[in-house]
Every structure is written in structure tokens, then in C-alpha cells.
Image (cartoon, helix red, strand yellow):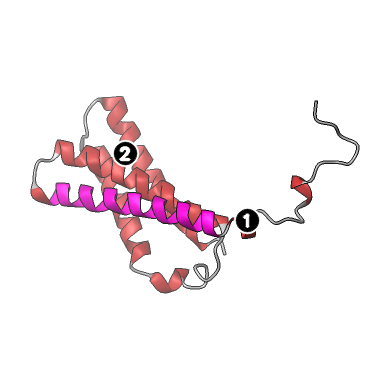
Amino acid sequence: MLRPVFFLFSAAPSMASLAWASITGSFDTASKMLFFLSLFLFTSLICRPTLFKKSMRKFNVAWWAYSYPVTLLALASTRYAKEVKGEVPHTIMLTLSSLSVLVIIALLLFTALYSKILLRDDDPCLKLPKHSRLL
């Protein structure tokens, strides 16, 4: 059920890449290495769809773990494309940015469609005590 959380492993190098670029003021070699590490981790997870087959059968709030790493990777690729002029970096940037938007739209739709699964009627946390009053 928590297999989507594996994608969070690719978020740390992306965030470190952006943070290091912000600290140094340029997207230098260290930032590029962290970006490519994140891209490698993300690609290695994408290439193993059978790993996530069981977790994708039923909607779960853990699916939101896909959005953060993809968005951070798209942001890092944008910074990389600004630094390295060329067609390949811009293609990577557009692909990851489009994937990020699609993932977030899909998650919003699935969350809206399956809100009954996430917020059950018999959830004790959602019920007010009988003696409480709203002032």
C-alpha cells in the first residue's frame, strides 16, 4: 500500500540540487550531479511498473507521494535547461513538467472521485461530541 512512497527517494537529490544552486548562485557541477542522480532514481522506479501494480488497485492517500518528487524533478530540470542550452535539456524539462501537471490533475480527480474512501461516515475523528456546542 505504501509503495508510492518509494518515489520520495528521488525527491531528496532534486531538492538538494535546487538548494545547492540557490546557495552558490549557479547550477554548477554539484547541482548537475544531484539532478542526474535524481533523474536516475526516478527513471529506475518508472521502469519497474510491476513494483507498483498491487498498490494501484485501490485508491489510497499514499498516491499523493507521486506528486512531490515529480514536481521537484521538473523544477530541477527547468533550472538545468536554463543553464545548459540545447534541445535535449528542454525536452526533458517539457516532459517532466507535463508529467507533473498530469500527475497532479489525475490525483485531484481521483481524490474527488474517491473521497468517500478517504472520509468515511463512521470515522470517529469527524464526529463532534454530543455535549459540545458551536458558539
Instruction: Looking at this view, name the residue that lies furthest to the right.
Output: 131
**Residue in the foreground of this view, choosing between 17 and 59:** 59
Q: CA distance from mark 1 to mark 2?
A: 34 Å
Q: Decide whether residue 92 is among the magenta residues.
A: yes
Which region of the structure is painted magenta? 88-113
Q: Which residue is mark 2?
A: 17
Horizontally, residue 46 falls left or right of residue 131, namely: left
Disc 2, SS:
helix
Nearest to the observer: residue 122 or residue 33: 122
- Give the image quarter of residue 115: bottom right
Q: Residues within 10 Å of mark 1 (few under 14, many from 20)?
A: few
Q: Position of residue 23 (x, y in %)?
A: 31, 26
The residue pinned by badge 1 equals 118
Q: Amino acid at mark 2?
A: Ser
Residue located at (56% from left, 59% from top): 114
Query: Is residue 54 within the magenta segment?
Result: no
